Image (cartoon, rainbow, N blue to C red):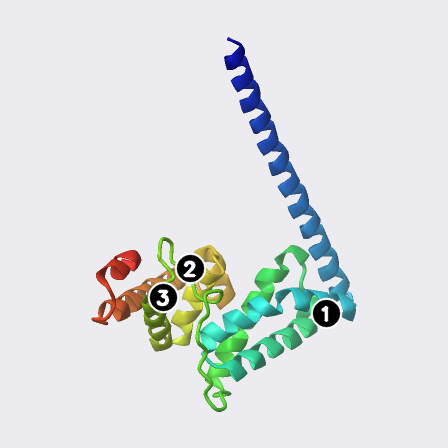
Amino acid sequence: MGSNNGAMHDVGTFRDGLATSSVARHVAADARSRAMRELVTRARDGDRDAFSELAAGSIGRLTAVARMILRDEYAAQDAVQETYLQAWRSLPGLRDPDRFEAWLRRILVRSCFIAIRRGKRSEAHEIQLTPGDEPTIPGAERAITLHDQLERGLARLSAEHRAVVVLVYYLDLPLADAAGAMGVPVGTAKSRLNRATQALRAAVEADERVPSRVKEQIA
């Protein structure tokens, strides 16, 4: 009887610990949201230091996205720079500070598409995806062979199809948010994602060097 009471006490303590941890995470998330909101509001009012903080906190992520969409180091850097220029100029028109990140992503994707249309690419400098940059495929091992196949598969996709793959699988955005970032209807984004996924799968399956067990992971 005493041992049962002790076990129940341990379970209760464990549950209390989980609840406390959950509360702490929510409090921390709320604090980050408030800090972000304050920075965006200050930047919107013309505070350059606040905007610099926002840029410092997002430049790594934006650059990785631009690299994967454009497949060109210099074009990616130009697109990110153009994104921040456009963001600074347009920020006074942002009504909801909580939408800043989604708003910034949309500017980035638009900048990438503009870079492609204008043919801004200088000398090609191919980007090799690193483990930290490649889209996540649930259950897949980080096998070199699979990595190479996805690398070549992404290179064969159009910028529009690469963009939806990056937004959904790399940034882990809901399809509706990805569609918003690209400025297209959800149905269009879904169609692009399906076609891109099929193309990537076909690229992997077409290569006889890929072990069958790796093929099964992305099927």
Give the alpha-carbon distance from disc 1 to disc 2, as whole Å: 30 Å
Q: Residue 171: image x %, image y %?
A: 49, 60
Mark sitting earlier along the chain (3/2): 2
At label 2, which amino acid type do we have? Thr
Q: Which quarter of the figure has residue 165?
A: bottom left
Q: Residue 210: image x %, image y %?
A: 25, 67
- For the residue pair 111 and 157, the one nearer the viewer reads as 157
Relative height, residue 184 to residue 97 (above, below):
below
Q: Which quarter of the figure has residue 10?
A: top right
Q: Using the image, tell me which numbered label, if any, was put on residue 52.
A: 1
User: Is disc 1 in contact with disc 2, using a CB cutoff of under 8 Å?
Assistant: no
Give the alpha-carbon distance from disc 3 to disc 2, as whole Å: 18 Å
Circle 3 SS class: helix
Q: Using the image, tell me which numbered label, if any, was put on residue 136.
A: 2
Give the labeled residue for mark 3: 192
At label 3, which amino acid type do we have? Arg
Closer to us: mark 3 or mark 2?
Answer: 2
Circle 1 SS class: helix
- At 68% from the left and 51% from the top, the residue drawn is 32
Question: How many marks can you see?
Answer: 3
Report whether residue 109 is seen: no
At label 1, which amino acid type do we have? Ser
